[in-house]
Every structure is written in C-alpha cells, then in structure tokens.
Amino acid sequence: MNRFFWQVYLALLGVIVVFCAFAAALFFRGHEPHIRHLTAAAAVAEVALPADVSAADAQARMQKFASALGGSAALYAADGTRVAEAGQPLPRPDLQRASSYLTRHPFTGVAKLSDGRWLVVGARDLDPPHGPMFASLVALALLIAAAAWPLARGVTRRLERLTTSVRAFGAGDLAARADASGQGEIAALAAAFNASAERIERLIASQRGLLAGASHELRSPLARVRVAAELIGAENAPPARNEALRAQLARDIAQLDAAVEELLAVSRLDLLGSADHALVDVLALAAEEAARAGIEASGAPAQLLGDARSLRHLLRNLIANAERHAAGAELRVRAEPLDPARPESGARFVVEDAGPGIAEADRARIFQPFAKGAAASADGAGLGLAIARQIARHHGGELSYAPRADGGSVFTATLPGRAPAPANSK
C-alpha cells in the first residue's frame, strides 16, 4: 500500500479515535453526578428505612422519601421481593449486579444497600443532560471539521494544481508542467506527468522538424520528376535526352522512395515499446546485413534484448552511409558483446571504412535530420544517421562517430539492451 493511502487512512482513524475518546469522556462525566446523587440517596434510605422496619411503616416512609426526591422510589429485598414503592412503577433490580448502576429505559438509578437490599429511584435529578451533551457533541464535530480542513485542503490543492497543468497541456500548451516538489504519491504523480509531457513535447518537436525537413528535401526531387515527365512527353525530343531524363527520373524516384521509407521507420520507432523487444543474436544479424552488402562481418557471439527489425535498420543505414561516402574503399562490420565474459550483457556494432572521412566542421551535425556534409552524395535524404541514433537511444544506448587513425570513419553503436530511453531524446 502506498503512503497516500496510509495518510488518509490514519487521518480518518485518528479522527474516529479522538471522537470516541471525547464522546466516552462526555458520557462518563455526564453520569458522574447521577452516581453521586444515587449514592447519597442510598445513604439516606439506609437511615430512613432500616432493615427491621415494618412493612406498613416502610411504605409510609417510602412515600416521604420519594416526595423528598421529587420522583419515584422502590425498595426491594435481597431476593428481589418488593418491600415498598411510591410513585410510578419502576423496574426490578438486576440481582446479578454487585454494585450500583444506571439504566436508560426508563432512566433510573439502582443502588445496592449495605444489608443486601436494593433501592430503585427515578428522580428528576437523574434525567440525562441532553442539552449540554448535545452542545458538547456539536462543538466536538466543529473541532474535528476545523482540524480536518488543513489536511483536506493540503491534498486537494496540489491535485487542483496538477489538474490545471494537465488541462493546460491538453489545451495545447506543451510547455505546461506540474509542481513536483515535496514527497508522496501526488509529487510522484506530478513528476510522472512532467516526464511524460517532456517526452511528448520532444516527440512533437521532432515530428514537426522531420515534417518541415521532409517538405523541404522532397520538394526538389518532386520538381525534377515533374519536369522530367513533361520533357519526356515533348514532341520531337531527342532519344538520348529522353534516355538521360529517364535515368534521372529513376534516381529521383529512388531518392523519394528512400526518404519515405526512412520517415516510416521514424514513425514506427516512435510507436515501438519495450513489449515488442525479444532476444536478438547480433552477430547473426550483422552477418546477414554484411552479406547483403557483399562483405563479411567479424566479431563474437552476443545477445541483446531489443527489436530485431529496427536494429537491422540501424546496421543497414550505417553500411549504406559508409558505401555512399566511401565508395570503393575498404569497409568492415563488427559485432561483439559489451562484456566478453557475459554475451547477454549487450552488444556493440562497429562499422568502419577507409574513405575520406568526415570534415571536422560537419561532425557536430551529422546526426541531425536532413543534414548533409560538403562531400555528401545527392542520393541520400540525410535521415540515415539520425534514425540510426534514434534506434540506438531507443535501446538505451548511443551511436557515436570517431575518425580512423589511418583515415576514414568509425561509427560505433553501443547497445546495453536496457529499457527504451524516452523517444527522440537529445
């Protein structure tokens, strides 16, 4: 059970205990004077009605005794036999009792005399103090209500502020955050909302950036496709020009297709959760992708808890990037466990080439969507490395770049296989 539950439960329990204690105190304090009056009446009865008094004399004395009390009275022998009675009929005493007591229906006092006889009285002085007791209970209820107010407001005020933040976020204010200060379940709830809101804000910002970049990057090939389609259909067009236009058209369509495929990969990655992960043999995966590119993969057996499809896309993008920017140069792919003693500890993909490398001025932005270096090929959409890094971060890892000592590039994807990090984290 959580702390918030215990706070509420113990608060209510405390209120009940305090209420019962005060009510019991009021009840017993309210009956104290009645017990004293009953004890005094019993002392008077022992003197006025001695054990050896006759029945006729007992009845006469009982009339005077009841008149002096201003109510009713009855005297019973030790065995419960009525000796004398005056006024309204009164109930017989409970012979099992060992001492004086009070009854409620009707409200009477029963005293056991020293010689074993019983005195039952029903006097006005023994009426319960309904007015003062009711007033005391009302005052107690108001006290409890006043004491519970700060607790209730302290809880509801924080919930109201959290509700305000959630409503603002739902209305489109993506920067809205809740006050997560303090401890307890409400603070934890506010912190969870802030983390979710931050992730959604990053996700939407990333989607907007990708959409803006895609609209800019796809406009040029679309324009070329449209122009090429118009020129190919022109009358008396030279066959050589038509052939060149068809080749250009095929390249532009391939570029558009690659860009759309990358955008779909981003969308799928945003929706991917840890529930979709399974155990992946990374060396086998690297060997398959390397063979697809006509090369061999090296390394050691390793296992990784992740999404095989997206990990394949990561490695494929790294190999395609190396082939595009280091055409004809040596290309190597390696897969290995992070800890050689524990193949299930996670994995590392390494793709290195002996190409010209990446200019120092371009290294800071190579992982940005649609970013292209000075030596970039026009065939790429500029999304491959950005998506590869997102896949690595989705698996709790990172993708990094380093120049080779003898020239070229080294891309390393470190994948511990932990729970997915927030999507599109920077």
Image (cartoon, helix red, strand yellow):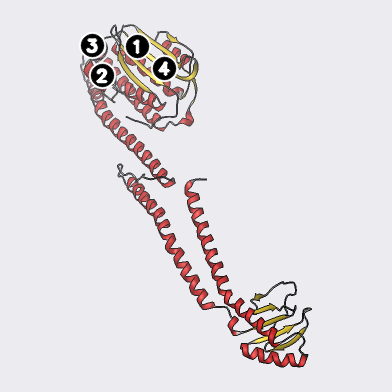
Q: Secondary structure at mark 3?
A: helix
Query: What's the residue at 33%, 44% (across, down)?
Result: 177
Which kind of residue does numbered mark 2 sit on? Arg
Q: Secondary structure at mark 1?
A: strand
Q: Classify 10 Å Cα crowding around label 4: few (below 14), some (14-19), many (20 and above).
A: many
Q: Quadrant of residue 70?
A: bottom right
Query: What's the residue at 50%, 70% (across, down)?
Result: 137
| Residue designated by label 1 | 352
Which kind of residue does numbered mark 3 sit on? Ala
Q: Residue 357 appears at what percent x and percent y?
A: 27, 12
Q: Residue 283 appears at what percent x and percent y?
A: 46, 14
Q: Are marks 3 and 4 in contact (CB under 8 Å)?
A: no
Q: Secondary structure at mark 2?
A: helix
| Residue designated by label 2 | 363
Q: Earlier in the sequence, mark 1 or mark 2?
A: 1
| Residue designated by label 4 | 348
Q: Earlier in the sequence, mark 3 or mark 4?
A: 3
Can you say which quadrant of the picture contains the C terminus?
Answer: top left
Of circles 1 and 4, the one toward us is: 4
Which kind of residue does numbered mark 4 sit on? Arg
Q: Quadrant of residue 329?
A: top left
Q: Residue 81 appears at what percent x and percent y?
A: 78, 82
Query: What's the residue at 66%, 87% (across, down)?
Result: 72
Q: Is 263 located above or below residue 324 in the figure?
A: below
Of circles 3 and 1, the one toward us is: 1
Residues at marks 2 and 3, CA–CA distance in whole angstroms:
41 Å
Q: Is 12 located above or below residue 104 in the figure?
A: above
Residues at marks 1 and 4, CA–CA distance in whole angstroms:
13 Å
Residues at marks 3 and 4, CA–CA distance in whole angstroms:
49 Å
